[in-house]
Amino acid sequence: MRQAGRYLPEYRALRETRGGFLELCYDPEAAAEVTLQPIRRFGFDGAILFSDILVVPHALGQVLWFEAGEGPRLAPPLVDSSLAALEAAPERLEPVYATVARVAAALPEATTFLGFAGSPWTVATYMVAGQGSKDQAAARRMAFGDPVAFAAIVDAITDVTITYLSCQIENGVEAVQLFDSWAGSLSPAQFERWVIAPNAEIVRRLKALHPSTPVIGFPKGAGGKLAAYARETGVDAIGLDETVDPAWADAALPENLPVQGNLDPLALVAGGDALDAATDRILAAFASRPHIFNLGHGIVPDTAVAHVEHLVRRVRGG
């Protein structure tokens, strides 16, 4: 969950030499270095590609930039414009594939390499609004008011995402993750249509191309809809955000389905007894099923490196 980032001094030093965030994502040499930095420092069991979910709408033809202190912007927002007006630019993803190849060649053999993409619903919320939002209202309104137009956007994202993940796999990633950061904003029926259905399509078509590559689904905020997501999408493992009770998840999810998560990133910031107690609770809950220990969402910039080192030792029994 965002292994790299501003909590690492080596990341901050590199970022100062490379300009903006998007420039860093599209610089294969720099992006590969950022991907490898946490592995060198902590010896994690898996490396996560350094990129961003919004490279997919960029490849679909929207203009993408990041406003300092405010986050991403996409133009034209599809709440005002037509998908058909965009001119696809799949070549914009080539630097990501070059990054993957560099990292794959440099990683220790025992370290798993994870690629990722945003899930269609979450990516669509940015494409429709032209930016992030607290309640994803613009996309939700379009999904209700003009489901045909919204379905066309979701379908376009789905198609590009399958190609994007397939190319990541062909260049060296060993598993892929689908991040649905805004899955929790939907009602059950809308969740079925805009989260479960497109993710199931991605899994089905990706498995036809790469049957042995695991797919991890992360529907943040899904809560009680997690079990249906796990059953109906066909994912090989499911990521849990920090709001999910690990004991409930262990009881509710299909037996032996691997889970990933779900330490609260702020417990990692706090450290000490709070971190140890939260860690032990998660480890105990998932002791009887395959478990990838991870955060429940992205690591935050004010995380102490020493806390990460302590967490790694505790999870490994040191």
Image (cartoon, grey):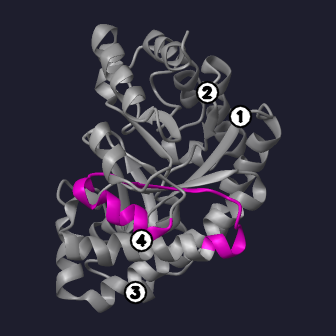
Please provide the residue range marked out in magenta. 206-234
- On residue 152, which mark appears? 3
Who comes first in sequence, dot 1 or dot 3?
1
Tell me how far mark 1 sits from mark 3, CA to CA. 38 Å
Q: Secondary structure at mark 4?
A: helix
Residue situated furthest bottom in the rendering? 148
On the image, the x and y values in percent for residue 61 come to: 50, 74
- Kind of residue at badge 4: Glu
Q: Is residue 75 above or below residue 275?
A: below
Q: Nearer the viewer, residue 93 or 244?
A: 244
Q: Is residue 78 visible?
A: no
Q: Residues within 10 Å of mark 2 (few under 14, many from 20)?
A: some
Q: Which mark is residue 111?
A: 1
Q: Is residue 175 left or right of residue 52?
A: right
Marks 4 and 1, how far apart in space?
A: 30 Å
Mark 4 and mark 1 lie on one chain; the one further toward the N terminus is: 1
Looking at marks 2 and 3 on the same chain, the residue that comes earlier in the sequence is marked by 2
Asked where in the image residue 279 lies, by quadrant, the reply is: top left
Q: Is residue 286 magenta?
A: no
Q: Image point 31% across, 83% down: which residue? A: 150
Task: Residue type at mark 3: give it.
Answer: Ala
Relative to residue 103, is residue 177 depicted above or below? below
Residue drawn 46% across the image and 32% down it: 287
Foreground of the two, 144 or 96: 144
Disc 1 residue type? Thr
Question: How far across and how far down the image is residue 171, in percent?
Answer: 77, 56
What residue is pinned by disc 2? 44
Query: Circle 3 sits in a helix, a strand or a loop, which is it?
Result: helix
Which three-letter amino acid code belongs to the residue tagged 2? Phe
Q: In the drawing, what numbered circle is on residue 232?
A: 4
In whole angstroms, how far apart are the C-alphas of marks 2 and 3?
Answer: 39 Å
